[in-house]
Each structure stands twice: as structure tokens, then as C-alpha cells.
Image (cartoon, grey):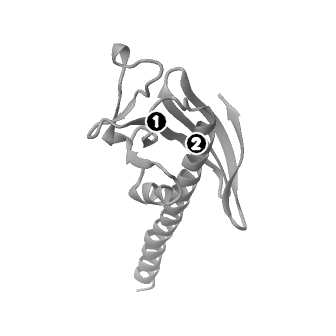
Amino acid sequence: MLRSLLALLLLGACAHGPTTSTAVRYAATDEVTTLALRESITRSLRDVRRGADLEVVCVRVQAGDPPPAVLTALAESVPFALRPFSSCRIERGELSAFDRAQVVEAETGRRGMEIFTESLVFTSATAFTVRVGFFQHPDVSGQWMCAGRQTSSGWRVDRCDDE
């Protein structure tokens, strides 16, 4: 009877523990990803070619679309039409001139840029590194490796270095 009770308690603790830490990690991942994408937008707007079309921003996280919560949180503070990257295409070759953005929203043909985050790593429970960047045209693009941490007021990016 005692063994059964201990086994049941152990099973309950194991089942509950990872779920809680996983849920916390996902929440932190979404929050840090949103922060990193905001950093990407801020940095890209310093370099983006203003003469080229900028009607839409296509958002990529790793090799895919951002979680819906990230796209929603980002949309609240960005003055552009945001789309998940799967809604966009990249024009290549002769179809694109230097003064035209090669990132195109597939459905409407609106042009813009891609912003992205890659390689998010939590180096501790309160620190991270992440690669951020943007692409408008091969000659108008950039990426940075950023590091940040959690503070009493939330997550923040401390520095970003050119890559």
C-alpha cells in the first residue's frame, strides 16, 4: 500500500513538473521572440531602402511562421501589415530590380520586407541569445546576434552585434 501511494505521488509529481516548466518556457519563448522581432524591425528600418515598396512585413521564426500569439502581440505596436512568412514569397532573378523589394505578399502582390528571428537559446533561466534580421533585397538586408535578459520589468535586449 505504501509503495502504491509513493508510486502514485511520484507519477503525479513527474507529470506535473515538466508541464509547468514547459508552459513557463513557452510563454517566455513567445515573449522573447516578440521582443526580438521588435528589435529586428527597429534595426531594419534604419537600413531599409525607402524608395522601394514597403507595404507589408512578412514575419519568420526559425524556418516557419511565428506562433499566432507572437504575430498578434507584434501587430499591436507595428504600423505595417504583418503577415506570417507562409503568406509571402521571395522574387528572384530578373523579375526584381534593385529599387523593388523582392519580398512579396503572395495573395495581393504587395511588396515589403521579411523580418526574422533564428537560433533563440536560453543561456540561463533569465538570459538569452537570438539572431535577428531582415531582408528586402540582397543589397538591402542585415542580421545581428543579440543578447538579453529578464529584468524586474520584463525581458530586454542588452546588445546586438553585426554578423
Q: Residue furthest bottom?
A: 1
Q: What numbered label is drawn on residue 113?
A: 1
For image coordinates 44% across by 33% down, the residue present is: 53
Q: From the viewer's perspective, tell me whether residue 2 is left or right of residue 148.
A: left
| Label 1 Cα crowd, 10 Å radius (few <14 / some 14-19 / many 20+) | many
The image quarter containing residue 104 is top left
Q: Residue at x 41, y 49 (%)?
A: 81
The residue sitting at the left extreme is 107
- Residue type of the residue flagged with mark 1: Met
Local crowd at mark 2 within 10 Å, few (<14), some, or many (≥20)?
many
Which comes sooner in the sequence, label 1 or label 2?
2
Name the amino acid type tagged 2.
Answer: Ser
Mark 2 secondary-structure assignment: helix
Q: Mark 2 — residue? A: 40
Q: Nearer the viewer, residue 17 or 157?
A: 157
Q: Secondary structure at mark 1?
A: strand
- Quarter-of-image position of residue 8: bottom left
142 versus 98 height, above or below: below
